Each structure stands twice: as C-alpha cells, then as structure tokens.
Image (spheres, grey):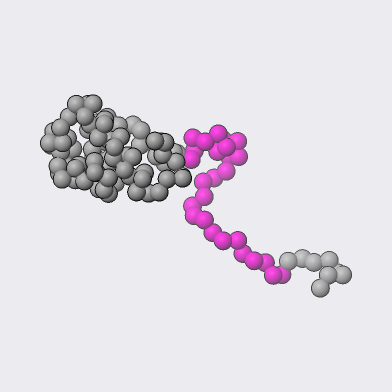
Amino acid sequence: MKINGELREKAIIEELSSRFKQYRIAYPMTRAELAEKSMVSIGTIARFENGNDIGVMNLIKILKVLALDDKLDLLIPDPQDRPSYYINKNTPKKRATKRKNNDNAWKWGDEE
C-alpha cells in the first residue's frame, strides 16, 4: 500500500508498523534482540508492530538499529534542498503571520 495524504492516520500507522515488522524479520532480528540493542522495551516494539503509537524518540531508536535511520531525512525534507530555494534565494521564514488589513489604502479621488 502506498502511503499518501488520502489515508487516515490509523491506516498510515498500521502500514508503517507492517513494513517495520517485515524489515525486522528480514534483518533477521527478534524483538528481544532489537529491544536490547535499541534500549526500547519489548512491549513497546510489540505495540508498534501491532499498529499502536510509540513516540518519536522510540521510533528513532529502533530505526537506527535496523539501519533505517538514513531514510528519516525523507520524512521532513530540508527546505534548503528544494530547487526553488536556490532560484528565489529567499531567507527562510521564522514563522507564519497574518497579513494586516490596511483600511487606509490609497484611493483615487473619485472613489468613496
């Protein structure tokens, strides 16, 4: 199944969990071995493989053990790596702000 914006959050977690379990088994590594190497409990690993939330820190720990941490950069890409960043040469925005409504905008003399 392809993960995209059309899937609900629960379906995305279940698909990630299924993929993770397939990687772990193909590695090959037991839950106990993964728990020992990642310093994450066996129960947490089992919860994740069953489609439950385990937290980002635990996810990163177990991905590192299975050598999948190099794929984390794809999760939220660096905005400076986009081609448009180099074309526009804009400075990165610090935060989003609303535009001010300027009621005192300049008008022609015949407008009211």
Region rendered in magenta: 79-104
What residue is at 21 percent from the left and 46 percent from the top?
47
Drawn side of residue 57 relative to residue 112, left or right: left
Q: Position of residue 102 (x, y in %)?
A: 67, 67
Residue 111 seen in the current view: yes
What secondary structure do most residues of the magenta stretch adopt? loop
Q: Is residue 88 magenta?
A: yes
Residue depicted at 23% across the width and 26% down the height: 26
Asked which quadrant contains residue 7, the reply is: top left
Taking the image as shown, residue 88 lies to the left or right of residue 65, namely: right
The location of residue 110, given as percent across then percent down, is 87, 70
Identify the residue at horizontal 44%, vertical 41% (top origin): 4
Residue 111 forms part of the magenta stretch: no
Residue 22 % position (x, y): 26, 31
In this view, 22 is above or below 103: above
Q: Position of residue 100 (x, y in %)?
A: 61, 64
